[in-house]
Amino acid sequence: MASSVLLKARIAGVFYLLTTVAGLFYVFAGNGFIVTGDAIATAKNIVASESFYRLDITANIVAAAAYLVVTLLLYELLKPVSRSLSLLAAFFSIVGIASALLSFVCDSAPLVLLQPALGANASSATTLQTLAFASLKLSGLGTTAGLIFFGIYCLLVGYLLFNSGFFPRALGVLMSIAGICYLINSFATLLAPALAHRLWFIPFGALVGEGALTLWLLIAGINVPKWQERASTASRFLVSAD
């Protein structure tokens, strides 16, 4: 049992790291294709580096799949603290992952639209390029909406970590801050884009929180004796409730 719990923590750390690397690649590499307010230039960038663009949107799928593994493992690890809250956290994470998959569909649209544009007349080509650009905007909105759910997920995980007894309380605080950062950045992007540009540093707070949890899972893992004690208490409580 002890080795199984520790192994789950380590695997969660590995997949959390994979999520972070793939996610950062998707965001920063993807932004390199987009020229603000210029559909034609954006289309040219995608067509000129199609293989790299395909790699970029694939990174989004990898990040989503890896985060699903993280979600399931953290549910198992944090279940002794509160089964219902851990399940609720997993629900919000899965909804966020689903929005990431919808973003993948929008990101893939330019690959379909821009190929016919290469042999089309000027008017048709411009229309297709505009549609491709619009699909990228929809992808951005989908990603932003997804981060709202991830923000709630981080807040719930932060609460569970803080009250767990088998993770440092500091991790709970940092994950809660990460959740708040996601929410501030997402709502600012949706409601006041100009303000969101001024708050460019906010997402780094989320990166610090999730990065700290990732490193802890990889290096320290989990306090197994305290986890076993908490799990045993939770199990006795469920038995007595029945």
Image (tube, rainbow, N blue to C red):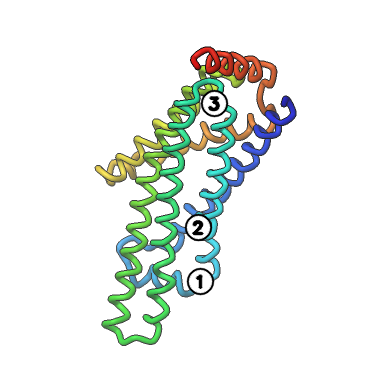
Q: Of residues 10 and 81, which is closer to you in this image?
A: 81
Q: Decide which of tag 2 and tag 3 comes sooner along the chain.
A: 2
- What separation in Å lies between label 2 and label 1 (alpha carbons)? 12 Å
Q: Which mark is residue 50?
A: 1
- Report x, y in % for residue 144: 36, 47
When asked about the image quadrant of residue 224, the answer is top right
- What separation in Å lies between label 3 and label 1 (alpha carbons)? 44 Å
Q: Which mark is residue 150?
A: none
Q: Nearer the viewer, mark 3 or mark 1?
A: 3
Q: Which mark is residue 79?
A: 3
Reading the image, the residue beneath label 2 is 29
Q: Amino acid at mark 1?
A: Glu
- How crowded pointer 1 is (Cα within 10 Å; few <14, some 14-19, many 20+) is rated as some
Q: Is residue 10 left or right of residue 156?
A: right
Badge 3 marks a residue whose secondary structure is loop
Residue at 47% in and 52% down = 27
Residue at 70% in and 29% down = 6
Q: Decide which of tag 2 and tag 1 comes sooner along the chain.
A: 2
- Report x, y in % for residue 49: 51, 71
